[in-house]
């Protein structure tokens, strides 16, 4: 789906998942609209992260206008995911994740890629599914932005107090 999807189609999807007809959808309702491509429900933590990103009113729900932007965000990530899922397995293994994140400009050690796999491989099968891939990328982007704020000299090294560290990391979750 290149570009912006048909507004009428998105409205029909939105209305289908807006079970209580409130004009806004919460995380549980949104979860029913999203697909992993492997018949499993979308990770609730990923759904909550995305609601937080697109909820302009800060009410833990998104309106139809927010939903349009979120849908585009998800489809853009889907294209990225598919481009790095070299074997078309509907998941990303460690090597594919390394290729992806290196392409994004991250320079992580082998042990850190192991940590990422441990954190985002919910099935413990050595692979990351689409929803967890989105979560991984959101967490990395958020942590990177928080670090850059603390790295005043732009040297890749930051000296922070415990409270500064806690403030920076609590923005992620």
Image (tube, rainbow, N blue to C red):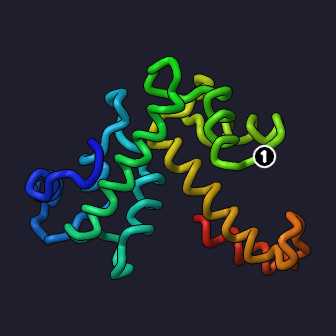
The percent coordinates of residue 128 (x first, y second) are 55, 33
- Left/right placement of residue 147 relative to residue 128 reads right
Q: Quadrant of residue 140?
A: bottom right
Rendered position, 62 above or below 80: below
Q: Quadrant of residue 58?
A: bottom left
The location of residue 157, given as percent across then percent down, is 89, 66
Say which element carries label 1: loop
Q: Quadrant of the N terminus?
A: top left
> Which residue is under mark 1?
107
Relative side of 93 to 68, left or right: right
Instruction: Name the residue located 47 percent from the left edge and 61 percent from the top edge.
Output: 49
Please tell me which residue lies in front, 74 or 1. Answer: 1
| Residue shown at 74% from the left, 40% from the top | 115
Residue sitting at x 38%, y 55%: 73
Residue 9, placed above or below residue 150: above
Count neighbours of disc 1 (C-alpha within 10 A) and say few if under 14, some if 14 to 19, many if 20 or more.
few
Image quarter hosting the C terminus: bottom right
Question: Which residue appears at 43% of the width and 68% of the height?
Answer: 52
10 w.r.t. 53: above or below: above
The image shows residue 40 at horizontal and vertical percentages of 36, 33
78 vs 118, left or right, is left
* In-front residue for pair 130/19: 130
Find residue 78 and report its horizontal and vertical position in percent: 40, 41
In the depicted structure, whether residue 33 falls above or below residue 62: above
Whether residue 96 sits left or right of residue 27 in the image: it is right
């Amino acid at each position: 789906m290149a570009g912006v999807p048909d507004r009428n189609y998105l409205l029909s999807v939105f209305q289908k998942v807006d079970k209580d007809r409130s004009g806004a959808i919460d995380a549980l309702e949104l979860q029913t609209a999203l697909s992993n491509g492997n018949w499993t429900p979308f990770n609730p933590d990923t759904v909550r992260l995305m609601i937080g990103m697109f909820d302009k009113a800060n009410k833990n729900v998104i309106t139809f206008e927010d939903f349009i932007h979120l849908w585009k965000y998800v489809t853009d990530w889907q294209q990225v995911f598919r481009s790095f899922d070299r074997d078309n397995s509907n998941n990303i293994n460690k090597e594919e994740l390394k290729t992806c994140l290196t392409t994004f400009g991250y320079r992580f050690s082998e042990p850190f890629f192991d940590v990422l796999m441990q954190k985002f491989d919910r099935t413990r099968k050595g692979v990351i599914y689409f929803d967890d891939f989105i979560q991984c990328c959101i967490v990395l982007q958020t942590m990177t932005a928080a670090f850059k704020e603390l790295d005043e000299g732009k040297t890749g090294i930051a000296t922070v107090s415990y409270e500064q560290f806690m403030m920076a990391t609590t923005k992620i979750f």
